[in-house]
Amino acid sequence: MQQRVYLDNAATTPMLPEVLEAMLPYMQDKFGNPSSIYSYGREAKMAIENARKFVAKSFNAKPGEIFFTGSGTESTNMALYGAVINLGVKHIISSKIEHHATLHTIEYLQKQYNLQVSYVPINKQGHLQLDALNELLVNTKVPTLVTLMYANNEIGNLLDIAKVGKMCKQYNAYFHTDAVQAVGHYTIDVQALGIDMMSSTGHKFHGPKGTGVLYLNENIKINPLIWGGAQERNMRAGTENVYGIVGYAKALEIALNNLEKDTAYIRNLKSYCIEQLNKNIELISYTGDVNNGLYTILNAAFANTAAASMLIYNLDIAGICVSGGSACSSGANNISHVIYELRGTEDVIPIRISFSKLSTEQDIDKALEVIIKTVNKNK
Ligand SMILES: Cc1ncc(COP(=O)(O)O)c(C=O)c1O
């Protein structure tokens, strides 16, 4: 059987065997409901609280500030709804290159609650113009939420979080960050960075899918999105995903314990990939700040020729998984909103290659072989 090559780690990552091993007891013998007061329940409850303590410590937060949710998307919804409905936010400042979890939630809230929404302009490299953000904050006259992502999932650009956190404090705005692509890839200190609310998800750092976390500063009081039982200290009703929570914490622990080594390894893979692409393809460009961005993501673009338009198809036939530049969730063939913001309707074929510590140079060579052959065909 053809061996598949997986280079789409910004979409999701394979779960590590050690993570599964940590989860399995809670799918089998330790299956109790954490709300039950007898021993089965207590051991499940203990597993959740130990996971919470570990996650809190990793973010330099308090256990009471960590809420387990069902996804990064849910965490962001909870933060944004809470800001508007409970904190009285009337103005949201964001950017056009956020994930749809943020953009579509803002659009809905704007319609329902008649909010003012501002988007921080971006430059050609995809960096937010922080002077413009400052200007927006100086002029805002109503309670304001800034929601900006830590690392962009398509182009890998990183935000100067500390600077934004400081600006938000200065002007009394709430600050939420979608850190889905950053947690597990960087150490994050929510206090030092001035973050009020932060979304993350386990499946982007070799944990299980369906496991989100919302960090919520203890001074921020919002209501739950999901009502019912008293789980998550009344903030998210429904019997907890015990093994998912255990898996999220285990994956984070492994990621943070090996961060320096894994980061260096993945950085090298990315540099190698860039070097080979530049050497072998004449008309190539990159979207975003390729040299200073997230080390796991590379977004390349090729001239739109008949041959190059077959790229994703050819890679798929060869068993190589990378992402195209189309709207990611629908699979539709229209250009993604992020690429559009940076390149407009420029006629290029974009691909996103994204690496993990399980990627190898051989994986990249196999992908490069197809890319180079396809793009250079009939040249
Ligand atoms: C930046 C970013 N935000 C949010 C999400 C959504 O996370 P989840 O799949 O856990 O809902 C993703 C996942 O693709 C992402 O990359």
Image (cartoon, rainbow, N blue to C red):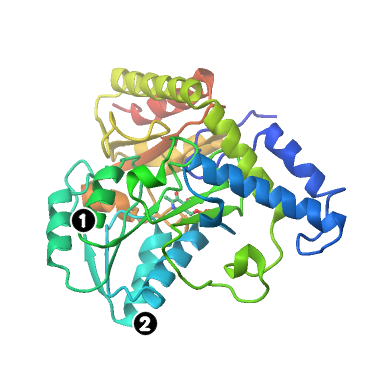
Instruction: State the residue in front, 331 or 165.
Output: 165
Amino acid at circle 2: Gln
Q: Which of 350 and 36 is in front in this view?
A: 36
In what element is the residue under mark 1? helix
Q: Nearer the viewer, residue 272 or 25?
A: 25
Q: Is residue 212 left or right of residue 342?
A: right
Secondary structure beneath label 2: helix
Percent from the top left, x then y, of residue 203? Answer: 57, 45
Residue 316 visible somewhere in the drawing: yes
Q: Do the residues labelled 2 and 1 touch (CB within 8 Å)?
A: no
User: Is the CB atom of the residue marked by disc 2 within 8 angstroms of ligand 1's nearest atom?
Assistant: no
Vertical position of residue 196 compared to residue 292: above or below: below
Amino acid tagged 1: Gln
Sequence-wise first label, 2 or 1? 2
Question: Residue 179, how many percent across, how many down?
Answer: 42, 48
Would you name the residue on which mark 1 appears? 170
Q: In this view, does 335 lie to the left or right of 282?
A: right
> Mark 2 = which residue?
112
